[in-house]
Amino acid sequence: MKILAFETSCDDTSVAILENDRVVAMSTRTQLEHDATGGVVPEVAARSHANAIFPCLEDALQEADISIDDIDYIACTREPGLQPSLLTGLTVARTLAESKKIPLLYIHHIESHIFANFLERNPDEIDFPAMVLTISGGHTELYLWKSLFDLELVGQTRDDAVGEAYDKVAKMLGLGFPGGAKIARLADAFRENPDFNQDEKNYWKKFFPRAFLDKNSYDFSFSGLKSAVKRYIDANPPASENDFQKIAFAFEEAVFDVLITKFLDASDQFKAKTIVLAGGVSANSQLKNRLEIACNFLHKKFVAPKKNIYSQDNAAMIGIRAFYEITKNPNFGNNPENFTKKL
């Protein structure tokens, strides 16, 4: 079974080809033009997708050494995402499917991030129930994963997504867009910085406020933290590399504290056997290390994408979500109502 998958939900144009559950080719192009505006402009993103999607398709077909006539199924992201961006991928996928009479599957973006964990492991490695944290520039959500196709939302951000907060703090510091990886690198540099002793590091670790919200809520809020960082930067403009490092570190520690506490509390409340991380921010090595240590202590399994490319938006995750839907229902496809959304 050969699956052709498209992902165009935001600012990454990605096309992948899977042979069953194995990725045989993938071509991804990241848009760089949004740095000038400090964020993704939907119309600009859509034009970039239109320019990149066919070169990505050609690259993927060439890498897989097949033609479009060899494809058995086509899959594309339907929601959530930026509507102009989504429409580009949907239009191309639908046109190919109709012209070649190939079944088409509409895939839910968040579900595909979760299923991206199966690009490098077997579903049998997940002990259900599991608790899933999906974190990126567009979403911060907690799900109870009861079984392979049964997900229940138990918490979400009430304002900024965690990746969005990273990008906005990076913008405050003049680091450009996207800024998540830059903030993480500065924070890691501070952790190893010999110019600060442990007492100073502990001070900055607790410097910014945490919003834990209601005791019985698993929702998140990062707007207050973002505002606190802005007030500090306005009053104390960073003048040295050490200044940039300590601000990034203090911000990231506040984020981690809330994410990890809520994540583990929810896993305890719902008696989760496995902790699953997904989404672009799941590429943060410091966050993964801390969660893995906590899971070892709590005797829970910890699962996250092994390769950063599978944490970020990519078409392989769309393809793997389609594969498991087809395996469950071989006749799934060619109907707009046949949408994988289970959330």
Image (cartoon, rainbow, N blue to C red):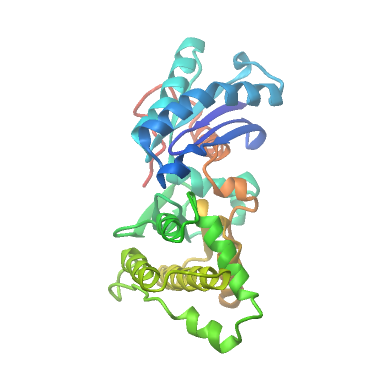
**196 lies left or right of 133:** right
Out of 183 and 157, give the one closest to the viewer: 183
Left or right of 175 on screen, residue 66: right
Q: Is residue 281 visible?
A: yes
Describe residue 267's horizontal placement relative to residue 307 as left or right: left
Q: Quadrant where the N terminus lies?
A: top right
Q: Quadrant of residue 36?
A: top left
Q: How many marks?
A: 0
Q: Is residue 120 above or below residue 333?
A: below
User: Residue at coordinates 52% horizontally, 74% vertically from top-left?
Assistant: 246
The percent position of residue 135, horizontal first and vertical second, equals 45, 56
The answer to which of 269 and 87 lies nearer the viewer is 87
Where is residue 226? Give x, y as percent.
36, 65
Q: Please tell me which residue is depicted at 62% across the width and 21% down the height of the picture.
A: 58
Outermost residue, bottom side? 199
Q: Residue at x 44, y 55 (%)?
A: 167
**Does any portion of residue 278 appear in the rendered image?**
no
Find residue 134 and report its horizontal and vertical position in percent: 45, 55
Above or below, comparing residue 17 to residue 191 in the picture: above
In this view, which residue lies farthest toward the top? 99
Q: Choose between 134 and 111: the one closer to the eye.
A: 134
Residue in the image at 59% along x and 26% along y: 56
On screen, residue 257 above or below 274? below
